[in-house]
Amino acid sequence: MLLGGATFVATPGATADAGISGTVRSSNGTPLKDVCVGVYQSRVFQGETKTASNGTYLVGGLGAGGYQLRFEDCGGNGVEYEFYENQPTFDDANTVSVTEGQITAGIDVALEPEGRISGLVTDIEGNPVAGVGVYAYRRYNSRFTVGFTETEANGRYLIGGLRQSSDYEVRFYPADTFVSQSFDGHSPVNIFGDYTPVSVISGQETPNIDAKLVLLTAPTGIAGTIRGSNGTPLQDICVGVYQSRVFQGETKTAVDGTYSVKDLVQGPYQMRFQDCGGNGVEYEFYENQPTFDDANSIAVKTGYMSTVDVVLAPAGRISGLVTDAIGNPVAGVGVYAYRRNNSRFTIGSTETEANGRYLIGGLREASDYEVRFYPAEPFISQSYDSISPVNIFGPYTQVSVVSGLETPNIDARLLQYISVAGTITDSRGNSVQGCNVTVGGKSAATDSAGGYEVTFAVPTIENGIPVIRYYASCPYPTYLEAVSGSVPVTNPSSAIVDLVVPLKNSISGIVTNSDGEPISGCSVSATARSGGLSTGVVTNSSGVFSFDPLLNGEYDVWVYCGGDYAPQFHDGTVDSEKVTPILLSGGDDRVINVQVGGFSSIGGKVSILGRNDFSDICVDAYGSDGTWAAAGVTDEIGSYRLDGLTLGDYRLRFTDCSFFPSVITEFYRDESSLESADVVSVAKDQDRQEIDAELRDMEPPNTYIEEGPTGRILTDAAAFSFRGSADATKIQCRIDSQPFTDCTSPKTFTDLTDGPHTAYFRAEDSAGNQDQTPAIRDFTVDTIVYKAVIGKVNVKGPAKVRKGRVAAYAVNVTNAGNAQATGVRLVVSGRGIRLNAPVGVINAGVTRTVNLRLRPSRTGRVTASFKVTSDNAGSRTVKKTIAVRK
């Protein structure tokens, strides 16, 4: 089925009734006719339809899958485009799924009021240009056209149907006589080129997006005016144009300071401005930059002359005097001023005059100029400050220039190539053939008489003096050590340099045991104290070793035979700080025989104050340099032994290494640090014994109270029995805050005041370790006598009562003692009256009221007895006469 205006779309494998349908309305709900609905799959166009007058559409003949939809105003409705649903681009579009054989309905959209872009297109003279294609693009991964029109006869255009965005690119494609461009003059136009973004707001028009088209035949280049800092036009300023450091052309300014460089191709350029007419101004790279790498680029567009005006500041200058080594002026020397920036760049040059003087102008202010001098032979090129040779990476002395000022005295004293000859002999005066000699950068070999000669040697300056540097190495192994240095130049054209090279040396010998028997397989090393040569050999079956050749210097020879032999130096020592070196001074063949011995040992006994078991004490030996040398552990009786020691001085440390350490670490003898420990000296093959130590146990004893008062006692004395653990040698006591004093069990504290008290008992062992948690007992002394006494008894109540009626009486009983009265009872007796009532307890000094209800059973005058009894406060009786009536 097709709706009005719909177009049927068929995709391969599709069924006739599969598709997408919906309604397109404006934002106010009005159905929109002639809205183009485009269908895409993976960006590939599948077909298009238009909405009917009621805004409905149907796209049929689709295959199963996901689709993107684009809605665009094709009927002048004044609404913006969108991708489903309300998305700006393909990449943002939501996918509509279609199932085979079914219509996906309800794909409705509401389009917002359109945004618009308008403008005027003219040529460079302002004449309107008709028929120019104007495109509005959105860039998103790749460009995407969202609007198109052509300019009218008056050059004006209007693109509608645009959605709100700030990144539109507007391009202008004219006929072949003009150059295509983007808005704001960007050319050429391409997907990756620069562009000026144009903003569009829904329901509004963005005007004045104009273009001035350039004819393809218009000139392309750079033009401008050069002036001094006071505004005066400058003639004969050289203007150089470069692209990526490649020279493109040069011109000079006219008398009015103007210049132009034409026939350039579109692209970025760098420009250099240099005084070629004696204007006294400095050079610069555009704009006011010192080097190529700092230069700002000028964008040149096809058909345009870019304008570059420049103001040049007053120039700085460098001047000086060039002479030979003895002060005579040298004319015609090329003098160059360089600025280094990645590679050198010449910015000024001249030649010395007949008086040897020069002046380089046109320089800009900087502190890093290099000044070079290039003379004719026989003189040698150099940089300022006598630095030679000159090259792009060599060192140089920087020269500072200030705008408008002259930097004087940048002088040069030129050196000449010279011839050098000489003779090389050894330390015994014999001439040496075959030595390689390098003098002033030139090389030669000595002949049979030890002579050599070089020409064109290059002198250098050391500490302000011309010198010739030399280096000579002679045949190995007779001569091992090369010689080098420098000699002053006293003649500007020739020099004699005689050299002496040292002869080689050797060290050899035999390694024997204490019985004089040779030992094979010993490792022997010779180490130069200068930090140079260090080499090793192994003794042969005759115990012989040899080091040949060796350089001059001091050597230490170390011998290690392994097994039961102790390592040592050649002089029997083992301490590198005490060994006497072997001195070799040229042609020395030293024979050094070495006798090695066995290892030494240290032993002794360790005892511990306060303990009977002396095992598990670790004993460590350290050499004189603090390096660990040997270790041992004591047995139950405290014996230890340290084997494998070599000749030398040692310090011992004694440490409890049991599972629960309880002995204080100390160093021999009774010292607290390795540095302060006494030294134990051991000779070769010596078993040093009786290196004993007495240590202190740091574990304190325990204290126990066996008998003693607790709580309240009624006397002013307290007796205690106590003891310490097995390692305790004495016990100290104290009461309350009194100081501890020695005491024995039992101990009685007397003359105690009434109140709380605390007794302390602290055990101590033979090492002086004290129990840090003394045994403590708290108690209270109370010597006051406490007694309860029934004191005053008072009866209150009526004196006349009727027979058989209840009468109320109150009996007040007072405890006059200082202790609580217990078991208190009240007994009332008399003719016709009987009562026995418990009262309980009455605290000391308290009066208790007992309320009674009596009912007399006989008439007449009755004497009633009120008796108060108790368990511990005695008793008291009072009598009261009561008249009982009928």
Image (cartoon, helix red, strand yellow):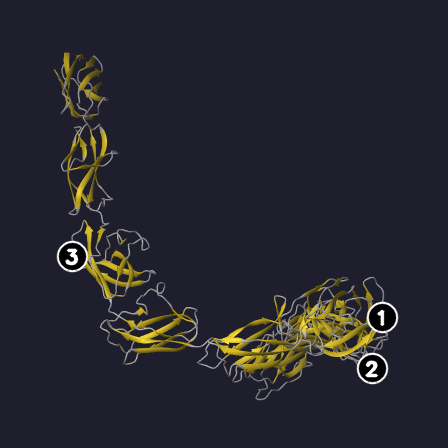
Q: Which label's residue is closer to the chain start, 1 or 2?
A: 2
Q: Residue at the far right: name it.
A: 255
Identity of the amino acid at label 3? Ile
Q: Amino acid at mark 1?
A: Gln
Find numbered disc 2 in the image and state the secondary structure of the residue it sits on. loop
> Tag 2 or tag 3, which sits nearer the N-term?
2
Residue 637 numbered mark, or none: 3
Mark 1 highlights which residue? Answer: 235
Which dot, 1 or 3, sits closer to the camera? 3
Task: Please name the amino acid that badge 2 sits on.
Answer: Thr
Which residue is denoted by mark 2 in the rendering? 217
Q: Is residue 819 visible?
A: yes
- Residue at image position (58%, 83%) is 18
Q: Are marks 3 and 2 in contact (CB under 8 Å)?
A: no
Residue 754 percent coordinates (x, y): 22, 27
Number of the front mark, 3 or 2: 3
- Indicate the quadrant containing the N terminus: top left, top right, bottom left or bottom right: bottom right
Q: Position of residue 98 (x, y in %)?
A: 56, 80
Q: Is residue 283 left or right of residue 605?
A: right
Q: Is there a contact, CB below 8 Å, between mark 1 and mark 2?
A: no
**Residue 163 lies in what quarter of the image?**
bottom right
Gap in Å between the C-alphas at discs 1 and 3? 111 Å
